[in-house]
Image (cartoon, rainbow, N blue to C red):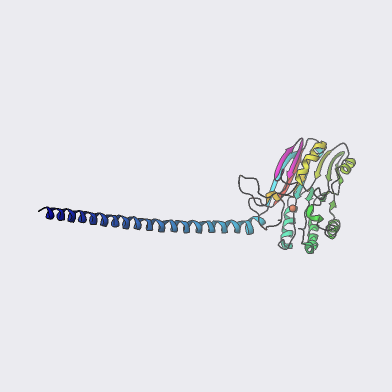
């Protein structure tokens, strides 16, 4: 009797253990199936996100390479200059900068650019340097297209750091400026008159290459009349504003950052172009304006920094 009871007890135990084991196997099987499904879903989501990321990146690249570099903004600004005589109120200056001729900048595009400048009907055109990118000397002859610029008074210019790539490069650019009737303000002053009133356009030669001689400019600058300074590198504004003689400085050099993420300072900015890198600033009593330029350096891309023609109407 005792033996029978023990036997039955153990049979029962064995039966319960088998049931428990089978249940565990089933639970394991279910969770394995669920995990497999979850893994499959995660892989699918990852693939979908990667696909979206690739499509968005391709669209941004397409825009930055093909669209924005050719999408010139004509920006009109009215600037009140404290020393401007009323006779000169309404005087229109059109600025372009950093044309950066290279193998991608075709003559057709240059013609389009200069005609767009002429359409603004400028009294004076100001060019603020970097005409041909370093290393692309063979394209310097394309600069003869500058000859079609047609302001009422004068086209004036200063050179930029790229225009000092080599002695030959600089000489060739200076020669073309001369041939196309453009006045290179190498530490010099050009004064224009309306009756007895005068407006002075001064220029410092390239600051980065240490060609600037502001002392010579100040020596030539008459005491009376509003004065505008052309300086390729915008951060020179700290020096020029300290003289108290200039109402306005026009610069380029930074390309506005060239590639800019919204709400952030551009990740790459050049020496002497990182403080006043884009648009309008007030430095002491002087106005500083930094044009975003036309061309490129390094990457042939522009994002959130369209090429720019600036049209200033001066107000007394
Ligand atoms: Fe430049």
In the image shown, does 132 or 178 lie closer to the viewer? 132
In the rendered view of the protein, which quadrant contains the C terminus? Answer: top right
Res. 85 visible in picture? no
In the image, which residues are magenta? 275-289
Picture residue at 73% right of the left edge, 38% below the top: 282
In the image shown, does 23 or 304 lie closer to the viewer? 23
- 195 on left or right of 29: right
- Pinpoint residue 35: horizontal percent, then vertical percent: 37, 56
- Residue furthest to the left in view is 1
In the image shown, does 148 or 12 lie closer to the viewer? 12
- 102 on left or right of 211: left
Res. 50 visible in picture? yes
**Magenta segment includes 248:** no
| Location of residue 47 with respect to 124 vertically, above or below | below
- Pinpoint residue 139: horizontal percent, then vertical percent: 78, 63
- Residue furthest to the front in view is 2
| Location of residue 224 with respect to 269 vertically, above or below | above
- 241 on left or right of 53: right
Picture residue at 34% right of the left edge, 55% below the top: 31
- Pinpoint residue 48: horizontal percent, then vertical percent: 47, 58
Picture residue at 89% right of the left edge, 42% below the top: 220
Magenta stretch, main secondary structure class: strand
In the image shown, does 207 or 111 lie closer to the viewer? 207
| Location of residue 102 with respect to 200 vertically, above or below | below
- 170 on left or right of 70: right
In this rendering, the count of numbered labels is 0
- Pinpoint residue 83: horizontal percent, then vertical percent: 81, 36
**Magenta segment includes 283:** yes
Residue 228 found in image quarter: top right
């Amino acid at each position: 009797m005792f033996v029978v009871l023990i036997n039955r007890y153990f049979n029962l135990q064995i039966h319960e253990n088998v049931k428990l084991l089978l249940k565990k196997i089933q639970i394991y099987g279910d969770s394995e199936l669920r995990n497999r499904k979850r893994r499959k879903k995660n892989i699918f989501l990852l693939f979908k996100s990667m696909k979206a990321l690739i499509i968005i990146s391709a669209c941004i690249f397409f825009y930055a390479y093909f669209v924005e570099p050719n999408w010139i903004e004509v920006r009109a600004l009215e600037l009140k200059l404290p020393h401007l005589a009323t006779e000169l109120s309404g005087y229109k200056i059109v600025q372009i900068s950093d044309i950066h001729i290279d193998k991608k900048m075709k003559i057709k595009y240059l013609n389009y650019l200069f005609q767009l400048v002429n359409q603004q009907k400028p009294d004076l055109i100001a060019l603020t340097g970097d005409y041909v990118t370093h290393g692309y000397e063979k394209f310097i002859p394309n600069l003869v297209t500058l000859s079609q610029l047609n302001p009422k008074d004068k086209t004036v210019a200063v050179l930029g750091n790229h225009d000092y790539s080599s002695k030959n490069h600089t000489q060739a650019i200076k020669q073309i400026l001369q041939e196309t009737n453009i006045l290179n303000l190498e530490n010099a002053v050009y004064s224009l008159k309306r009756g007895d009133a005068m407006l002075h356009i001064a220029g410092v030669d390239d600051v980065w290459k240490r060609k600037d001689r502001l002392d010579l400019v100040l020596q030539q600058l008459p005491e009376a009349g509003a004065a505008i300074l052309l300086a390729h590198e915008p951060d020179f504004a700290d020096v020029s504003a300290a003289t108290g003689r200039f109402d306005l400085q026009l610069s380029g050099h930074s390309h506005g950052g060239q590639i800019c993420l919204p709400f952030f300072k551009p990740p790459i900015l050049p020496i002497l172009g990182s403080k006043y890198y884009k648009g309008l600033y007030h430095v002491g009593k002087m106005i500083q304006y930094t044009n975003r330029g036309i061309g490129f350096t390094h990457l042939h891309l522009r994002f959130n920094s369209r090429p720019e023609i600036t049209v200033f109407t001066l107000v007394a």
